Image (cartoon, rainbow, N blue to C red):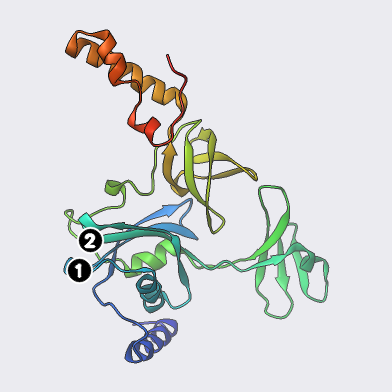
C-alpha cells in the first residue's frame, strides 16, 4: 500500500505530465553508489532508450521531479553521458536545511537539548550543530530521510549484463598524493591537489584552503602526480629499449607521455 506522500507525489506528477511539463518515460535508475554513509549524497546511473537521444539537463530535472518531487535534487554540474551504455551518471542528494548558529542563542526561537542539538520552538523540529572545514558552526535540520533507501525503492532491478557505475569508473576513483582532481564538496564541483589519502577519506588542497571529502566524492583525476608519471616513463623506456634494442630511440619515444600532453608536469631526465 502506498503512503500518503507517495499518493500526493503521483497525483502531482500526473497533473504535470498531463500539462506537458514531465516528458520522457524511457529513463530509469539502474545503479547507485553512496557517498560516505549514503544518507544524503550518492552517484546515480540512469539508463535511457538506445533509440532516443541522451537526456539533456532539463529532461534530467523533469525525471527527478517526476520520481521524487522536491525530495531529491540532481546536481547537473556532475552530469556525464555514457552513450555506449545508453546511460547518464550524476550526483544527487536530499535537501539539507541550514540555519545560522546565532539562532541557537535566541531562546524565543530555539530550546537547547544538548551541546549538539536544539529544538525549534515553533515547528518542534530538531537541529544538529555542525562545523565546516574552518571550524565555523552552523545548524542542519535532523531528518530521518535516507537517500540510499529512497533510491533503492525506485531503482530497477537489471540482469548482470546491465551497465554499472563501477564498470564505467564512477564512484571509486583511484587517486594518490600529488594528483590533481575534480571533486564534489558541499554542493559544488571544485578542483585541487590531493595532499593526503587515508582509507576512504581524501584531503584536497584548493585555492581557498584545504578540505577533506569521501573518496566517492572524487569525480576525476585531471593530472597524475609527477612521481607517477616518472615511474610510467621509466617503465616505458625500459620496455622500448628491450623491444627495439636502442636506448636512444626508447628515450625519444618516452620523452613526452600522454599524461604530460594533457597537462602533467615532470622533471626531465
Distance of mark 2 from mark 1, alpha carbons? 7 Å
Q: Give the residue at x 24% y 68%.
A: 53
Q: Nearer the viewer, residue 206 or 195?
A: 206
- The disc, 2 or 1, on the residue closer to the chain's N-terminal end is 1
Secondary-structure class at tag 2: loop
110 to the left or right of 8 = right
Is residue 123 placed above or below 241 in the rendered structure?
Answer: below
The quadrant of the rendering that contains the C terminus is: top left
Whole-percent x and y of residue 183?
A: 49, 48
Q: Residues within 10 Å of mark 1 (few under 14, many from 20)?
A: some
Is residue 242 placed above or below 27 in the rendered structure?
Answer: above
Residue 247: which quarter of the image?
A: top left
Whole-percent x and y of residue 15?
A: 37, 91
222 to the left or right of 113 = left
Q: Residue at label 1?
A: 49
Residue 125: which quarter of the image?
A: bottom right
Secondary-structure class at tag 1: loop
Is residue 62 placed above or below 255 in the rendered structure?
Answer: below
Q: Give the residue at x 41% y 75%.
A: 68
Whole-percent x and y of residue 46?
A: 30, 63
Residues at circles 2 and 1 in contact by the CB criterion of under 8 Å: yes
Q: Residue at label 2?
A: 86
The quadrant of the rendering that contains the N terminus is: bottom left
Whole-percent x and y of residue 244?
A: 18, 12
108 to the left or right of 6 = right
Amino acid at each position: 500500500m502506498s503512503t500518503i506522500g507517495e499518493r500526493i507525489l503521483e497525483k502531482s506528477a500526473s497533473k504535470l505530465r498531463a500539462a506537458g511539463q514531465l516528458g520522457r518515460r524511457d529513463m530509469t535508475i539502474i545503479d547507485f553508489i553512496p557517498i560516505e554513509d549514503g544518507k544524503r549524497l550518492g552517484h546515480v546511473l540512469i539508463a535511457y532508450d538506445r533509440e532516443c537521444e541522451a537526456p539533456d539537463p532539463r529532461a534530467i530535472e523533469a525525471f527527478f521531479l517526476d520520481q521524487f518531487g522536491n525530495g531529491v535534487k540532481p546536481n547537473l554540474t556532475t552530469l556525464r553521458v555514457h552513450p555506449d551504455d545508453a546511460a547518464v551518471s550524476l550526483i544527487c542528494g536530499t535537501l539539507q536545511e541550514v540555519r545560522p548558529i546565532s539562532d541557537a542563542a535566541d531562546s524565543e526561537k530555539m530550546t537547547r537539548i544538548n551541546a549538539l542539538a536544539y529544538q525549534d520552538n515553533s515547528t518542534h523540529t530538531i537541529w544538529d550543530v555542525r562545523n565546516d572545514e574552518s571550524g565555523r558552526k552552523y545548524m542542519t535540520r535532523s531528518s530521518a530521510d535516507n537517500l540510499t533507501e529512497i533510491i533503492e525503492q525506485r531503482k530497477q532491478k537489471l540482469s548482470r549484463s546491465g551497465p554499472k557505475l563501477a564498470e564505467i569508473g564512477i564512484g571509486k576513483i583511484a587517486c594518490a598524493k600529488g594528483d590533481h582532481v575534480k571533486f564534489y564538496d558541499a554542493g559544488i564541483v571544485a578542483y585541487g591537489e590531493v595532499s593526503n589519502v587515508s582509507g576512504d577519506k581524501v584531503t584536497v588542497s584548493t585555492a581557498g584552503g584545504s578540505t577533506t571529502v569521501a573518496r566517492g566524492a572524487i569525480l576525476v583525476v585531471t593530472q597524475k602526480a609527477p612521481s607517477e608519471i616518472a615511474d610510467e616513463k621509466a617503465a616505458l623506456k625500459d620496455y622500448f629499449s628491450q623491444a627495439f634494442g636502442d636506448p636512444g630511440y626508447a628515450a625519444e619515444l618516452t620523452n613526452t607521455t600522454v599524461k604530460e600532453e594533457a597537462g602533467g608536469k615532470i622533471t626531465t631526465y
